[in-house]
Image (cartoon, grey):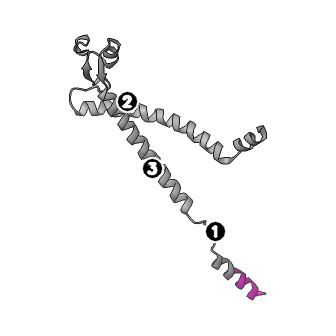
Amino acid sequence: MLKDFKAFLNQGNVMGLAVGVIIGGAFGKIVSSLTDDVLMPFIGWLTGGGVDFTNKYLILSGGEKVTEGMTLAAAKAAGANVMALGSFVTAIINFVLLAFVVFILVRQASKVIAMPDAGPTQVDLLTEIRDELRKK
């Protein structure tokens, strides 16, 4: 059984998958940072007043525990039942960005795979062989 497991791990697909998962996790952090640190502040600036989407929420119950300007984390800690709409919008933007980048990568990889080899065609090779044989 250990021998079969070792053979399984040495297959190219398993190693490629492991590398893809590791790179994907790191890339996910980059996209999250882009969304949280660049895009969302810019969108907040565009909407006027520098709206911070991370602290946008609706109070479902326990409104008496929430004071004006309280952050999402503080509202949750106070025991209020809140719907974190800002976090949801941020997650949607993260997903769309990640999906778009994966789409671009897959599209480019498909083009590279579909490209024919740059070497001579079979007809070109046969023509060269014919010409060499005529010279002799």
Q: Magenta region, mostly helix, strand or loop? A: helix
Residue, x 20% and y 30% (percent of image)?
Answer: 48
Disc 1 vs disc 3: which is toward the camera?
A: 3
User: Disc number at residue 36?
Assistant: 2
Which label's residue is closer to the chain start, 2 or 1? 2
Q: Amino acid at mark 2?
A: Asp
- Residue under label 1, please give it: 119
Which label's residue is closer to the chain start, 1 or 3? 3
Secondary structure of the residue carrying tag 2 is helix
- Tell which of 33 and 9 is nearer to you: 9
Q: Which residues are magenta?
A: 127-136
Residue, x 53% and y 54% (percent of image)?
Answer: 109
User: Disc number at residue 103?
Assistant: 3
The spot of residue 22 in percent (x, y) is 57, 36
The spot of residue 15 in percent (x, y) is 65, 42
Secondary structure of the residue carrying tag 3 is helix
Which of the image's four quarters has the C terminus? bottom right
User: Number of callouts in the render?
Assistant: 3
Secondary structure of the residue carrying tag 1 is loop
| Residue 124 falls within the magenta-colored stretch | no
Which label's residue is closer to the chain start, 3 or 2? 2
Disc 2 vs disc 1: which is toward the camera?
A: 2
Label 2 near label 3: C-beta < 8 Å?
no
Which of the image's four quarters has the N terminus? top right
Q: Amino acid at mark 1?
A: Gly
The spot of residue 118 in percent (x, y) is 60, 66
Cα–Cα gap, marks 1 and 3: 29 Å
Which of the 4 quarters of the picture holds residue 46?
top left
